[in-house]
Amino acid sequence: MTNDFEADGALAQAIPGFKPRAPQREMAQAVARVIAGQGELVVEAGTGTGKTYAYLAPALRANKKVIISTGSKALQDQLYSRDLPTIIRAINYTGALALLKGRSNYLCLERLEQHSLSGGDLAAQAMSDLIHLRGWSAATVDGDISTCAAVAEDSAVWPLVTSTNDNCLGSDCPLYKDCFVVKARRKAMEADVVVVNHHLFLADMVVKESGFAELIPQADIMIFDEAHQVPDIASQYFGQQLASRQLLDLAKDITMAYRTELRDVQQLQKSADRLAQCAQDFRLALGEPGFRGNLRELLKNQAVQRMLVLLDDALELCYDVARLSLGRSALLDAAFERTVIYRSRLKRLKDVNQPGFSYWYECSTRHFVLALTPLSVSERFREVMNDRPASWIFTSATLAVNGQMTHFVERLGIEKAQTLILNSPFDYSRQALLCVPRQLPSPNQPGGARRLAKMMAPLIEANQGRCFFLCTSHLVMRELAAEFRTSLTLPVLLQGETSKGQLMKQFVAAGNALLVATSSFWEGVDVRGDALSLVIIDKLPFTSPEDPLLKARMEDCQLRGGDPFNDVQLPDAVITLKQGVGRLIRDVDDYGVLVICDNRLVMRPYGASFINSLPATPRTRDINQAMEFLRAMRT
């Protein structure tokens, strides 16, 4: 296997421009050893290491069943469609591959049929999309909705014609034998290499669905790419949530059962309408949208308590009415089971005195989520690993804090794993410059965004755009974008005004754009070459100490004798900053300036933890030097 990575090895012969990299070879050797000994390995592989090939080659050479879990569906598609075929050609691998996504990514033939029959109150565009999907359903092989280009990805019809873990009928479904999820799972069971994502993997660990058993098969090798996301995603799935979308979907399904199969039970429509109304009224009782709050505090409010009782009463009515017609409709039987689950979940969420959990809620303009999240997932995740004896490999460009893996391995309960930190092969001393400007405005002072925009505008103009301005809040993002649009003649793109993919196309096509963005652009975005040579970060990405989940983790840390800031807040912020910084240099020929607009990086003792966790880069506090660096690199 090691020979695959030599100058005349299998990869060099199959991949144009392939160059041997010592860190890549070292990672591949470590992966091969762990696979041979069925051990556990955690690898931080800096940007440019080539970690994907470094784990794929030894995993495929082992001729064992492999599951690879990635951080997102986009990365999943990239791995399955680009990286795997390349390695397969290089080493002449003959095993079978499968791509497995969550069930909401596949067309549900039964729900398509039901909505076509019931008609419903669909808008003209949604009705047109529904008609198109009836034709597409007969032509598609795998039912993967991402391959249906004729229906927009944000079409209102998709939630109606896809299923979730909650509303899937399982083996009771009349169209079970034609189900795309069943076919995808069957293919995964038979495949040698299966590509999934973290959300699907963890949902499957927690929800063993009736009718389907486990979606993800057992395997000999488990690989988690973008592994830094796993602890937070695990927290989400090892907790409990009840969302208004679930309640409204339940109401829609009861209505559909009434319209298509049970026209003689008018009470079904009344109970569904009442549930939908109570869910909407509860959202109004929560007040202003756009933040995460403490559920324990919220439930002390008398008005909210009353609305919660009415919501529970509405679920009870759905339960009572549906129970009278059990056995007459598979759709209603499944809705009845969900009613039982949601009532149980609501009862659990109201019991806010259980220790070891954070209780929180979140509301957008139209929807809400009530949730409890365990403060630690280490025991549960360890159980998952013990239930599946295999070689476990975790890798990402951002796992270490201050040269240590302690934070990551403790959160997942994998303290006995071997660890390896491989620095990026890029020459940051030549390719990049870090600037922490002097006389920065205080981030929280009135007019701070305006002053920051004024300070950064000359640098952005001198670089002819080609800049990501990464913000730590939506409010600052919008304020900065508004300022730049009045002061710059360059194209200013703003996250949220169109899809992420569309924004990236516009940014690269423009060649001189400024993209102002927040959380979702801090990672998983790869812009190589001249299109991006300046990344500005508004401040160190500490999560607000008022965030109820962070607050609970900090309180729990203190109770166990730890230091909440150094053990919880600081490591989280360091890993997030590393992700943002990683947007700048993506290739050996890239160059650029990173600007971090936060004096704490150089004025506070903990700033050293951030600096020591970033690639070794020359530093300056003079914006003019940053301009000079960019000018020199362009010529």
Image (tube, grey):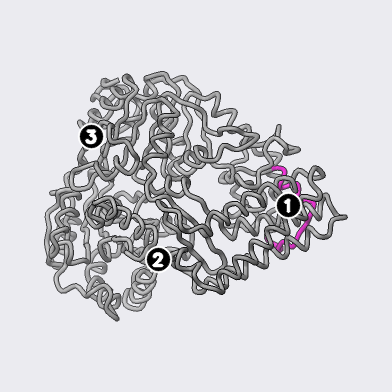
Residue 341 as seen in the image, left or right of residue 635: right
Task: Give the magenta range.
Answer: 109-125
Nearer the viewer's eye, disc 3 or disc 1?
Answer: 3
| Badge 1: residue crowd in 10 Å (few <14, some 14–19, many ≥20) | few
Q: On the image, which quarter does residue 418 sit in?
A: top left
Q: Position of residue 268 (x, y in %)?
A: 78, 57
Secondary structure mostly seen in the magenta stretch? helix
Q: Nearer the viewer, residue 352 or 465?
A: 352
Which residue type does callout 1 highlight? Ile
- Which element is circle 1 on? helix
Residue 592 numbered tag: none
Rounded to the nearest whole Å, what is the CA distance between mark 2 and mark 3? 39 Å
What residue is shown with label 3?
A: 420
**Who comes first in sequence, dot 2 or dot 1?**
1
Q: Is residue 42 visible?
A: yes
What residue is shown with label 2?
A: 493
Which residue type does callout 2 highlight? Leu
Number of numbered discs? 3
Which residue ends up furthest to the bottom in the rendered image? 446
Q: Is residue 583 visible?
A: no
- Which element is circle 3 on? strand
Residue 131 numbered tag: 1
Dividing the image into 4 quarters, which one contains the C terminus? bottom left
| Badge 2: residue crowd in 10 Å (few <14, some 14–19, many ≥20) | many
Q: Is residue 121 magenta?
A: yes
Look at the numbered discs 2 and 1 and tell me whether their residues touch, using CB distance below 8 Å: no
